[in-house]
Structure formats: structure tokens, C-alpha cells
Image: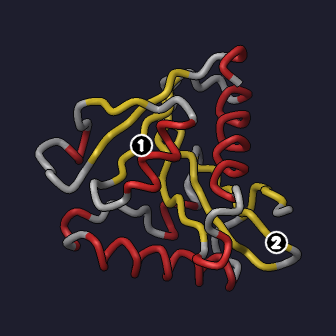
Amino acid sequence: MPIVSIELPREPDVLDLFRRGDEYALSLYPAESYYGLAIGDLEKTGVTLFVAREAVAAVGTVALADRGDGTAEIKRMFVADAARGLGVATLMLNALELHALASGITLVQLETGPKQPAAIALYEKHGYAVIPNFGQYVGDASSICMEKPLTPSAR
């Protein structure tokens, strides 16, 4: 069973997952519709990176970008091909939501795309609902935005 922990983004195997995630997203969407955080942005105050590891190998990543107003955005969710279907994304999402609650975050939002039905299904399964596009995603037909209010009882 993979272990999820908070890590820094510049470990070689984590950088490799980011590269693969970028390649995957760019195979589905035009570059102007790709909104992945840069490595430097993942190191900023208020951004927490969660990494799932199977033994020592990184098999998944997800970041939580705290906006400082009780809301946050999920960024950089990616699971390696070999680890898909094994519950890695759920483990990471659970860790992220627990951390968000402990940090005083009461609403988590995200952006995904219509060519990622498995991602949409995962988020819906965990209580995320589709909302109108927000922020930089407004007007982008390649974006689907979702959100979930967090309460201790929802966990």
C-alpha cells in the first residue's frame, strides 16, 4: 500500500512524475489550456505537495495551493500509469483534505478537463461538484471546474 507524505518538489523521481504529467496533459489539451504549477510555484509559501510512494518510488503527486482566505485549489494531481486503479489518487486526496481542514481551509476547488472522465469520476465520488469556471479558467472550453466544501464531519 502506498504511503502519502508531504515532500519538496525537486526529488528526481518527483520531477519525473511532473514531466510525465505535463506530457499527458499536453497530449490531451492545447498548451494555452494547460495550467500546471511550475516547480518554483510549488515551493512557494502556502503550497503543500503530497507525494505517494510505493516502497521508495514516487507513484503520485498532488498539490494544495492555499489562497489564504479559507479556500484552496488542487493542482498537479497525477498518478503514474503503473499505479492507476490502485487507490493512489484516493489516498492522496484524503491526505490533502485532512491537511486542508487542519489548516483552516473550508472550500477546495480544482480544474480538470472534459477529456479526463476518470478524474471527473474520482472527484465526484469524493463529493466534488461541477461549478462555473473560475479565475483563469473562465472562458476555457477545455476546463471543467469543481469544488467541495470541507467540514470535519465530511471526512
Q: Which residue is mark 2?
A: 54
The one nearer the camera, 24 or 96, is 24
Rendered position, 151 above or below 143: above
Q: Quadrant of residue 23?
A: bottom left
Q: Would you place residue 134 above or below residue 85 in this image? A: above
Q: Is residue 142 left or right of residue 78?
A: left
Residue with the mark numbered 1: 110
Q: Position of residue 38 (x, y in %)?
A: 44, 68
Total marks in image: 2
Residue at horizontal 73 percent and vertical 74 percent from the top: 58
Residue drawn at 51 percent across, 21 percent down: 149
Residue type (three-letter) at the residue carrying disc 1: Leu
**Spot occupied by residue 74 in the image (x, y as percentages of width and height):** 50, 46
Image side of residue 146 versus residue 18, left or right: left
Q: Residue at x 38, y 36 (%)?
A: 146
**In the image, 10: left or right of 37?**
right
Q: 75 and 10: which one is in front?
A: 75
- Helix, strand or loop at mark 2: strand
Label 2 crowd (10 A; few <14 / some 14-19 / many >=20): some
Q: Position of residue 155 (x, y in %)?
A: 71, 25
The quadrant holding residue 109 is top left
The x and y percentages for residue 111 are 36, 47
- Circles 1 and 2, Cβ within 8 Å, touching? The answer is no
Q: Quadrant of residue 129?
A: top left
Q: Residues within 10 Å of mark 1 (few under 14, many from 20)?
A: many
Residue 14 marker: none
Which quadrant of the rendered structure holds the N terminus?
A: bottom right
Work out whether 62 lies above or below 11.
above
> Real-space Cα distance between discs 1 and 2?
26 Å
- Residue 65 shown left or right of residue 9 in the figure: left
